[in-house]
Image (cartoon, coloured by chain):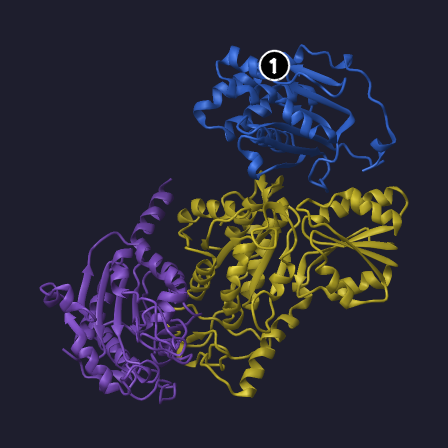
Chain colours: A yellow, B blue, C purple
Amino acid sequence: MSEKTGQRLLLQGNEAIVEGALAAGCRFFAGYPITPASEIAELMSLRLPALNGTFIQMEDEIASMGAIIGASLAGVKSLTATSGPGFSLMQENLGFACAAEVPCVVVNVMRAGPSTGLSTSPAQGDVMQARWGTHGDHPIIVLAVSSVSDCFDLTIQAFNLSEKYRVPVIVLSDEIVAHTRETVILPEQAAVTVIDRMRPAVPPEWYIPYEDNSRGVPAMADMGSGYRHHVTGLIHDVRGFPTERPEEVDAFIRRLFRKITNGFPEIQLTKTVMLEDAEIAVIAYGAVTRSALRAVRQARGRGIRAGLLQLITLYPFPRKAVEAVLRQCRRVLVPEMNMGQVIREVKRVNVATEIVRHNRVDGQFITPAEIYAHLLAM
Amino acid sequence: MMQEDRYELRFGGAGGQGIILAAVIFAEAVGIHEGFHVCQSQSYGPEARGGRSRAEIVISSEPIDYPRVIGMDLFLAMNQAALDAYFADCKPRGILLADATFVSQVPTSRALLLPFTTIARQQLGDALAANMAALGAVGVVCGRVRLASLEKAIARRVPAKFKELNIRALHAGAAAARQLDLAALPPFIDSEEEKEV
Amino acid sequence: MTEKTGSLRHDYLRHDKKFPHVWCPGCGNGIVLGSLIRAIARLGLQKDELVLAAGIGCSGRMPVYVDFNTLHATHGRALTFATGIKLARPALTVIIVMGDGDATAIGGNHFIHAARRNLDLTAIIINNQIYGMTGGQYSPTTPYGSFAATAAWGHIEHAFPIAELAATAGASYVARGTVYHAAMLDDLLAGGIARKGFSVIEVMSNCHTQYGRRNQMNDAITMLRYFKEQAVAVDRAAGMSAAEMAGRFTIGVLADVEKPNFTEEYQKIRDRARQQ
């Protein structure tokens, strides 16, 4: 539990992620120093020991990702946090977590890239990497935070979804949210919904570790709890052993996708502001939501019927919510701190409505005035 | 024009002058002890050591959308370089509060000059306490926070052995600011821009 | 002394996993597996409290055969997964089996840091001096002047002495054995598993299929004979000159020290943190 719940606090986004993780039951953190994510590791190193948890600084981000998978296999909810360059290194083992269905949460505090980029400047360039960074066909869940309170709430949500669906969940933050301090009131621990992975209800000799069920999410036994089984990154049969039989391979891959598709209604989180009678809309995510919100309010002040759709879940892409906005509005603006990543997903939903782009790649925050100027012209 | 009581401050100075700490203390005082919504941010990176340093605070009684400064209502400049670099975002009605120890040229008539570093050095024997003296003056000029709230925030954010020094500096700066006549500041020009964003 | 492997097969290997295994006839990996279960039986460890983790390569297939908690991780990363498992459940005995390329090329950084960190883990590195599974490319332990699929003109790099590297990096227990000296290997593995802290057992093993074939050692017996002739016991090597040791390697326990290990040290931090 988090000792800071129930109080009015001034927290940075990175600090709120730690509080959210602890409230969700996270008791293991492995990481490697990187700006602008390091505060998460620093605070975890301070907080975890007293909660009987474990912090370890690994030799790199590859190792950090491996360690959190190991801890999760042994039954402990696990977190790592990084930024773009480290996130690139995590992709290999992230794929293992997808294939072996190991719950874990990865926070990527985005900074401007490519490569070392601008290490202290915000950007939103890692959306596609979060979705498709690791190799092979795989489903994954990606959430985007826009405020300090989001950092707390969505980190809990990330753990819950990860546990429920046995899938790694990526939390995309950015340098703005990470380092802005905001007043927040964290809920009491008792008011926090915490979901734990489903563990086997059968005795060990009956346990089939990757057996399908109606949800498509097999029960997961903690390593060392008497349910001896094999875990591998190879495509495996229901017993966890490597297989190349086409019918078993096909069933495995399709179940990985089906378990997420089944959960769309609760996984695809969005938020609407003043969309009821909107003629034009902004679709935004992350810190840019804040600029968009202000611009939409200003436009309303001018009599322009503008609205906002905030994408909280980026993947699985909330197609239904986006489609509703596209059907209703004559023009839609997608402002992003990249050259256009989510706009492509929006366009894939519907090409009939005019979709306008606004991109900023100079390491600077998109301002309300930039979005407002578009709304005036739309 | 939107009906909101959004109030924006920026603190600028040299790295090592305690600009960010002052902003965090201010944010905590108004956010925790005065009950406002607060967003506080700062520039990081090469600027944070030796060069220029910048921190911002946005205050509102409503939840804050855009967390950064759009136009400052109050700009605290602790040296000339920071004043020159960061003044441009000041609202026409905004007030410049500057450390007269290091600032000689001001780009606005709505400027208040107090020698924070000199005050800190002479009254407290430590020039490093200038940031807290300035914070005391900011508290008086902005009118949105009680000195008692700033004291509480200092107690939480500053190591115990420096607490007393910092609180004395806070009061010294506040006392100096009370000598100023805010009503004597010239009126601002209400430009059209002021109504936008 | 060597325990009878026959009944141990039934006790420790998976009944639901079909044999024959994936390894070539005569492969040294089977000897290492036999030694491992004999060492475990000798220490009286229960299957539920054992973890065998591996990376990628021929050695990586070993976990699937043993009836423990088993993990087949990514290439070179087995130690990182094992670190998480051990820290999450310190009561488990965690053993990692890796190949030379797995442990000291792609996983080299994890390897030296695991040794430095001194977590209570046992790393078995099967050193066959080649990348076997991918087809005989040179590894960090391929000898200077030998041939490999990617050293068609002769190898011009120098080999890592794995055991010496581990000792220098800070491992608590370091030993080297060979698949020829199987009885000694039982002792070395049991010693490493029993030692608190990071243990490394380098096992010189034969890949006659990929290494031997290209280096005038076409079959398993030739390679085992090579190990028999080139291996020198640690105490005997101490009395030999550098010239006498040229091209040969020591076997036995190279380091066995008692020092604070991460698992116990971290528990002390937890206790201190809880008191405050």
Q: Is residue A146 above or below residue A217?
A: above
The answer to which of B80 and B141 lies nearer the viewer is B80
**Residue at (34% x, 75% y) in the render:** C154
Using residue B60 as the reference point, say whether residue C209 is left or right of it.
Answer: left
Q: Amino acid at mark 1?
A: Pro
For the question of whether residue A225 can be seen, the reply is no
For the question of whether residue C177 can be seen, the reply is yes
From the top left corner, tell me how far across and down residue C76 is, in percent: 40, 67
From the top left corner, tell me how far across and down residue A17 is, in percent: 55, 49
Label 1, residues with CA under 10 Å away: few <14, some 14-19, many ≥20? many
**Residue at (57% x, 68% y) in the render:** A165
Q: Is residue C64 above or below residue C107?
A: below
Label 1 chain ID:
B
Tag 1 secondary structure: loop
From the top left corner, tell me how far across and down residue A22 is, in percent: 50, 51
Which residue is at the far right? A303
Q: Count of labels shown?
A: 1
The picture quadrant where one finds residue A67 is bottom left
From the top left corner, tell me how far across and down residue C121 is, in percent: 31, 63
Which residue is at the far front? C153
Q: Is residue C138 above or below residue C80?
A: below
**Residue at (26% x, 86% y) in the render:** C220
Q: Which residue is mark 1?
A: B115
The answer to which of A203 and A38 lies nearer the viewer is A38
